Image (tube, helix red, strand yellow):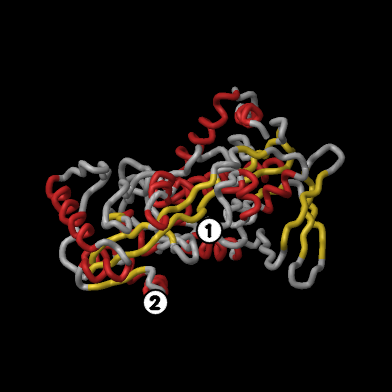
Amino acid sequence: MSHEEAQERRKAVPAEGASAGTATTAIGEGMGKHGTFTVEVSANDGGISWKHDLMQFGGHNIKRFIIPITHSGSEMTTKLTDRAKAIDAITLIDNTQATELVTDSTGKVVGVKVKNPVTGEEAEVKCKAVVLATGGFGSNVDMRVKYNPEMDDKILSTDSVAAQGDGIVMAEKIGAGTIDMEYIQTYPVCDPETGALLYVGDVRLENYGVLVNKEGDRFVQELDRRDVISNGIKAQTDGVAYLLFNQAAADATGLVEQHADEYENSESRGVIVKADTLDEVAQAQGVDAEELKKTVDAWNRYCADGKDPDFGYSAEMNTIEEGPYYLMACKPAAHYTMGGLHITPKAEVLTVDAQVIPGLYAAGEVAGHKMGTNRLGSCSMTDIYTFGRIAGKNAASYAK
């Protein structure tokens, strides 16, 4: 698709006569309007536990969001799955792969073809509406390269191996349009060997620690946008950065203890090292120890002054004083795909000609054009809950 064609597709008119220029605005307003309500419902009805203190992920300029108490998505998926199983009107079918959307002669979606990957048995599920919530394509290297050649197999992924873009491909086969597919986000603080997101590294998001390079120097504002930090890391020696923090940060955040399995695994492979002195952690990671100590001294002065003249740190600044110290290697990995199926603010999937496909809805990462060119941290939760509710409500109304 040419650049001009892509631009025209972005101007597609949503349902019910809204003008072309209001499509993205309406989607953003929808997420903002429903965000607080979504948290209340998920806690009261879904049993999800949220951290009560506000946090500031990369790209935000203030603390303004909350995350699950465990810092991970399993707090949401596990409890909401249990909630769904407890509702008699809902049937959850395991070990079943959706392979094809079924349409009638008018183009309406009227079913889904499925396959049991264990037995090979195939079947067709008839229905009046389908909601696609199949996620993005961050683990599909071929699909990534198709839209963004820079995202090749040298870039690992934080995503589940199931993030293959299957829902997008199925919908394309019945004429669905896609949008923003070239925009693929990397998360900066990931395991250099596996690509896994390093949750111990969330000390950074609670305003502790600094990112340095092999030379022992800071090179970026630690709470900048994910793409800015990722690109900064890629420009450093060996394409690797190191997150430095101390025991005071580990104790204040509780993240080393909370993610003990990850920490022990990372430590056993030398991804993270702990020692009593800066010299020791630097030597273990091959970082210039003398320069690292100068960097820490400068950082502590900036903390005392309340201002970072080098990179403009955007939140509360915490010193790195007494040890023990931790030095964790990290590099970017594919994390989120901003592109996906083109939808209306009602979560209806559009064709390549911007016409609504009757009976087909999409929510979450499978749907594109909600996050701009690079998603801000935490916003995917607002997206999945808000558009999950919108898609479900509108699909149910359509099916009546």
Residue lying at 28% horizontally and 51% vertically, measured from the top left = 218
Whether residue 102 is situated above or below residue 216 in the rendered picture: above
Pick the residue in front: 29 or 343: 343
**For the residue marked with disc 1, what is the amino acid?**
Ser
- Which part of the image, by quadrant, shows the C terminus? top right
Q: What number is the disc on residue 306?
A: none
Residue 220 rendering spot, x and y as whole percentages:
32, 47
- Residue 166 visible somewhere in the drawing: yes
Q: Which mark is residue 268?
A: 2
* Res 347 → quadrant: top right
- Of the residues under marks 2 and 1, which one precedes in the sequence? 1
SS at mark 2 in the image: helix
Neighbor class of circle 1 (other Cα within 10 Å; few <14, some 14-19, many 20+) is many
Q: Is residue 197 above or below residue 317?
A: below
Left or right of 120? Residue 285 is: left
Which residue, given by chain and number where applicable, does mark 1 sit on? 157
Q: Is residue 236 left or right of residue 181?
A: left
Marks 2/1: CA–CA distance: 21 Å
Looking at this rendering, what residue extends furthest in the right direction? 105
Q: Residue at x 77, y 60 (%)?
A: 114
Q: At which x and y percent is residue 275?
A: 24, 73
**Could you tell me which secondary element the residue under label 1 belongs to?**
loop
Image quadrant in which you'd find residue 36: top left
